[in-house]
Image (cartoon, grey):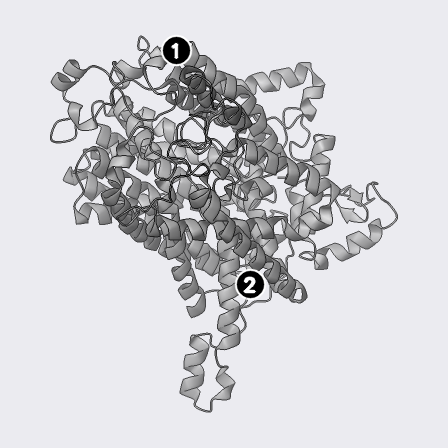
Amino acid sequence: MSALVEDSSGRSDDIQASEVSKADVLTKEASVTVGEESQTNSTNEAEGNRSAKSQNENDTVYVNGHPVIENGDDVSRFLISDRDDGDPSFTFRSIVLGTAFTALSSVITMIYIFKPTMMQVSAVFLQLLVYIFGEAWAIFTPRPDRFKSRWVQKTLRFLNSGQPFGIKEHVVASLIASSGNNGLAGVEVYAAERLFYDRSVSASTAILATFSISLCGFVVAGLLRPLIVYPAEMVYWTTLPQVVLFQNLHFDTRANRGRLIKFGWALVLAAIWEFFPSYIITWFGGLSIVCLATINAPENTRTIISTIFGGASSNQGLGLLNFSLDWQYIQSQYLSLPFKQQLNTWIAYVIWYPAMLGLYYSNAWNAKNFPFMSTSLFKSDGSRLTTTAILNSEGIIDEAKLAKIGLPYLTSSTVWGYFTQNLAIGALITHVIIFYGKDMVLAWKQARSKTQPDPHYRAMLKYKEVPMWWYLVLFVLCFIAGIIVTAHGETTLPVWGYIIALLLGGFIAPFSCILYGLYGSGVSTNQISKMVAGAVHPGRPLANFYFASWSHQVILLAVNLANWLKVGQYTKVPHRVMFGTQIYATLLGAGLNYAVMTTIVTNQREILLDPEGNSVWSGSYMQSLNSQAITWALAKDMYGAKSRYFIVPLGIVIGLALPVLHWGVARVFPRVRNWPINTAIIALYSGYTYYGNTSWVCSSIAVGVFSQFWLRRRLPRIYNKYNYLIGAAMDGGSQIVIFILSFAVFGASGTEHRFPTWWGSPSGNPDHCL
């Protein structure tokens, strides 16, 4: 499986493809002390041979005595220790801590669903919080040996009182806390029904549908474990910082005090700072020199300037050269995503800016009749289309009402976003088949024969694997629950449509898992679910919602479970513990998400229905889901061969050809083989931000260049020690404050209390663009 990341040239698409990429991976030596046991001998052999290749059979490159991590095999041998202390994993403490922090992460994630830009709680931040409380539990509770009574001793040991907090407990608690949002898709459907259809599902439908949607995809990950978990090349790069941190905290205890002190200071400072850009000085959320320079210009000029350079408010503009100092929208992912992934997104932004402006100002699809950016549906005169105006009482398109009002219109930004998503889906399928097909077959054969050479896979063979029938039983239960719900009729999705949804998700899931494992980021595949749903269920937007939720959730859950199974493989947590706790966390999080959703939708309904929203609340994401459901329910009229948006489904076909073109160009021009190009990622990010806040885009590029290009190469010691740690602390500090402000002053639970208006916190757009 060592060739799993080969590009069209047959050379490694990972790090060794270019000189830039080589410098990029000096990273992972990051792991500083983590893998010292496995690195010691190799490092000694390399002393005095700087920038030279070792003479061992793997030809590993060493720089200043340290191995350069070029691929997944290097990660397994040099970066991640294969140490296994045999400590317990499934304990009372791990369940309690995991449950407590699932509540925190679920609530914050649900809040961000209704924010101008969607974010999730940093997994590394949750990991560190779990560690702090786990250590406190061990230190400040009495040890069992202090008591003479055996019954008391047994009880205290069960409660982990005074017992050391081990790495496996830590992993399990963090897994539970991070998996609480696996069931988010079902809750989003219920939110859409409340907002746009003025209806809510019954308790039985909510329970059964949530159970089925939340867990149906686990069987795919179970079936594909030999392909998407066991091979060394399936690294899941964005979770690598978590594995490194797990082992640093538990295998290198001498450095823990200093790390945690720095983490605490960074968290406190980030929390204090977050009050300013989010509440007191909202101008910090979007600094635009161009907007300030044209503040006295005519209104027409300022409108154009705002479209190009404004981005601090939801759906305001493209945010070109608009820098945000609000960390809640930047986040630490740009400190950890590999350079090759970020490079592809930067290429995509070069396409995104002119494409969005060109479509709007050329009046494509009557773009100027509607807002520049919005995910709402509109009438031909530019007014917002109310969903219920074209539906009957059962949530099905009423042809008579539709004929009177006319077909819905989309903004040009939304059409471009849909088109690029389809481009990315097509490119994903072809890219995986062309570049990774042979290696997938090899990986499967190695796993089936248990000859997979990865040392971490070999170390896990002593633990009982999850029997395939466990996955199958879980799937059968989910399948039956789905059958009951769809047969009942409340979802408007027929049983046969539900089965097609599961089959579609099962087909796409392997492609998504492979790309995510290799690059640390995937492709938005929800669009293809909407397309197929529209084709098989015309006139049924609610059926489209449920079809897409089941279909896409199969894909999402396969990625999430594979990701955590890989973490478990690296940290030697037994397979069965990982399986059971993932199920528990998913169901717990779904319930908490539902409770928070109903609170926010009830109290902020009007602003969530507004096409533009404001700098605090926005229904853009939910509006986008609804727009897709409505328009794909009218697929023949909206996206057919003779319709105005035919380019959207055509994107799938064009996308299928992009990797073929890439492969052909690389054959003709060999130098292209050295460029870590991934057309699926470029296609996706060329229209990824078609709504919401955009002031973070330039800031994210700056953060990525600073971290992955400069700090990592020039000051690797500082990068290795503090890059992930400080980023996680900043995520945590900002998200805790947003959680507090959302309920205290932003009106999540009722009355809103705005900060007094002044120049630094204007009543209009925070960046003074209009």
Q: Marks 2 and 1, how far apart in space?
A: 56 Å
Image side of residue 527 versus residue 294, left or right: left
Q: Given contact means CB atoms under 8 Å apart, are the residues at marks 2 and 1 in contact? A: no
Query: What amino acid type is highlighted by mark number 2?
Result: Ile
Q: Where residue 337 sits: x, y (%)?
A: 58, 39
Local SS, label 2? helix
Of the 4 image quadrants, the one containing the C terminus is top left
**Disc 1 residue crowd, few under 14, some 14–19, many 20+, Cα 10 Å:** some
Q: Nearer the viewer, residue 146 or 365?
A: 365
Q: Where residue 73 sits: x, y (%)?
A: 66, 44
Q: Nearer the viewer, residue 376 or 512?
A: 376
Query: What amino acid type is highlighted by mark number 1?
Result: Ala
Image side of residue 657 versus residue 279, left or right: right
Q: Nearer the viewer, mark 2 or mark 1?
A: 1
Q: Which residue is the extreme one toward the bottom?
A: 148
Q: Where residue 103 sits: x, y (%)?
A: 37, 56
Can you identify the residue that label 1 sits on? 364
* Mark closer to the chain start, 2 or 1: 2
Q: Which mark is residue 328?
A: none
**Disc 2 residue crowd, few under 14, some 14–19, many 20+, Cα 10 Å:** many
Can you identify the residue that label 2 sits on? 167
Please indicate, yes or no, whether residue 473 appears anywhere in the rendered image: no
Whether residue 469 is situated above or below residue 95 in the rendered picture: above
Of the 4 image quadrants, the one containing the N terminus is top right
